[in-house]
Protein backbone atom coordinates (compact mmCIF):
# COMPACT_ATOMS: atom_id res chain seq x y z
CA UNK A 1 0.00 0.00 0.00
CA UNK A 2 2.91 2.34 0.75
CA UNK A 3 4.25 1.73 -2.75
CA UNK A 4 0.91 2.81 -4.26
CA UNK A 5 0.81 6.00 -2.20
CA UNK A 6 4.42 6.76 -3.09
CA UNK A 7 3.63 6.27 -6.77
CA UNK A 8 0.61 8.58 -6.53
CA UNK A 9 2.60 11.21 -4.62
CA UNK A 10 5.48 11.19 -7.12
CA UNK A 11 3.06 11.52 -10.04
CA UNK A 12 1.18 14.34 -8.31
CA UNK A 13 4.44 16.23 -7.73
CA UNK A 14 5.49 15.67 -11.37
CA UNK A 15 2.09 16.91 -12.58
CA UNK A 16 2.22 20.04 -10.41
CA UNK A 17 5.81 20.84 -11.44
CA UNK A 18 4.96 20.73 -15.16
CA UNK A 19 1.91 22.93 -14.59
CA UNK A 20 3.88 25.35 -12.43
CA UNK A 21 6.68 25.54 -14.98
CA UNK A 22 4.08 26.40 -17.64
CA UNK A 23 2.82 29.28 -15.48
CA UNK A 24 6.38 30.50 -14.96
CA UNK A 25 6.95 30.37 -18.74
CA UNK A 26 3.81 32.42 -19.38
CA UNK A 27 4.95 35.05 -16.86
CA UNK A 28 8.55 35.09 -18.19
CA UNK A 29 9.95 34.16 -14.76
CA UNK A 30 12.78 31.84 -13.75
CA UNK A 31 11.83 28.32 -14.77
CA UNK A 32 12.19 24.86 -13.31
CA UNK A 33 15.16 23.15 -14.91
CA UNK A 34 14.61 20.34 -17.39
CA UNK A 35 16.89 18.18 -15.25
CA UNK A 36 14.49 18.57 -12.34
CA UNK A 37 11.44 17.82 -14.47
CA UNK A 38 13.12 14.76 -16.00
CA UNK A 39 14.32 13.59 -12.59
CA UNK A 40 10.71 13.34 -11.44
CA UNK A 41 9.89 11.38 -14.60
CA UNK A 42 12.77 9.01 -13.84
CA UNK A 43 11.59 8.60 -10.24
CA UNK A 44 8.28 7.27 -11.55
CA UNK A 45 6.32 10.41 -12.39
CA UNK A 46 5.84 9.38 -16.00
CA UNK A 47 2.05 9.31 -15.91
CA UNK A 48 1.71 12.61 -14.02
CA UNK A 49 4.18 14.32 -16.33
CA UNK A 50 2.48 12.96 -19.44
CA UNK A 51 -0.92 14.13 -18.28
CA UNK A 52 0.41 17.58 -17.39
CA UNK A 53 2.24 17.93 -20.69
CA UNK A 54 -0.97 17.07 -22.50
CA UNK A 55 -3.32 19.21 -20.39
CA UNK A 56 -1.08 22.29 -20.19
CA UNK A 57 0.42 21.87 -23.68
CA UNK A 58 3.86 22.30 -22.13
CA UNK A 59 7.14 20.89 -23.45
CA UNK A 60 5.24 19.15 -26.26
CA UNK A 61 7.08 20.95 -29.05
CA UNK A 62 10.57 20.82 -27.56
CA UNK A 63 12.24 17.91 -29.35
CA UNK A 64 15.27 17.68 -27.05
CA UNK A 65 13.03 17.37 -23.97
CA UNK A 66 10.76 14.84 -25.66
CA UNK A 67 13.70 12.67 -26.72
CA UNK A 68 14.96 12.57 -23.14
CA UNK A 69 11.45 12.00 -21.80
CA UNK A 70 10.76 9.08 -24.14
CA UNK A 71 14.25 7.71 -23.49
CA UNK A 72 13.43 7.52 -19.77
CA UNK A 73 10.02 5.99 -20.50
CA UNK A 74 11.64 3.40 -22.78
CA UNK A 75 14.13 2.44 -20.07
CA UNK A 76 11.29 2.11 -17.56
CA UNK A 77 9.34 -0.16 -19.91
CA UNK A 78 12.41 -2.30 -20.65
CA UNK A 79 13.13 -2.59 -16.92
CA UNK A 80 9.57 -3.72 -16.17
CA UNK A 81 9.66 -6.27 -19.00
CA UNK A 82 12.96 -7.69 -17.71
CA UNK A 83 11.66 -7.85 -14.14
CA UNK A 84 8.55 -9.76 -15.28
CA UNK A 85 10.56 -12.02 -17.60
CA UNK A 86 12.84 -13.14 -14.76
CA UNK A 87 9.91 -13.41 -12.30
CA UNK A 88 11.37 -10.75 -10.05
CA UNK A 89 7.97 -9.07 -9.78
CA UNK A 90 4.52 -10.58 -10.09
CA UNK A 91 1.11 -9.14 -10.86
Image (cartoon, rainbow, N blue to C red):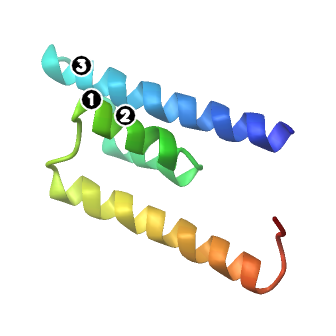
Q: Secondary structure at mark 2?
A: helix
Percent of width and height locating residue 85: 74, 85
Please determine whether, in this image, residue 30 is positioned above or below residue 60: above
Task: Place residue 15 in its image quadrant.
Answer: top left
Marks 1 and 2 close (CB-CB < 8 Å):
yes
Most extreme residue toward the top is 27
Percent of width and height locating residue 6: 73, 37
Between marks 3 and 1, how big is the CA–CA gap? 12 Å
Q: Is residue 88 left or right of residue 52?
A: right
Q: Secondary structure at mark 1?
A: helix
Most extreme residue toward the bottom is 86
Q: Residue at x 26, y 27 (%)?
A: 31
The residue under label 3 is: 24
Marks 3 and 1 close (CB-CB < 8 Å):
no
Q: Residue at x 55, y 29 (%)?
A: 12
Task: Place residue 16 in its image quadrant.
Answer: top left
**Which of 24/76 is in front?**
76
On-image quarter of the N terminus: top right
- The mark lying in front, picked from 2 and 3, is 2
**Which of 39/90 is in front?**
90
Percent of width and height locating residue 71: 39, 68
On-image quarter of the C terminus: bottom right
Please determine whether, in this image, residue 84 is positioned above or below residue 3: below
Between marks 2 and 3, how big is the CA–CA gap? 14 Å
Res 30 visible: no
Percent of width and height locating residue 52: 37, 34
Q: Residues within 10 Å of mark 2 (few under 14, many from 20)?
A: many
- Mark before the other along the chain sequence, 3 or 1: 3
Q: Residues within 10 Å of mark 1 (few under 14, many from 20)?
A: some
The residue under label 1 is: 56
Amino acid sequence: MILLYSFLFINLIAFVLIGYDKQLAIKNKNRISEKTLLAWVALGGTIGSSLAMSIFQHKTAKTSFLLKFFGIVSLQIITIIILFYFDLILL
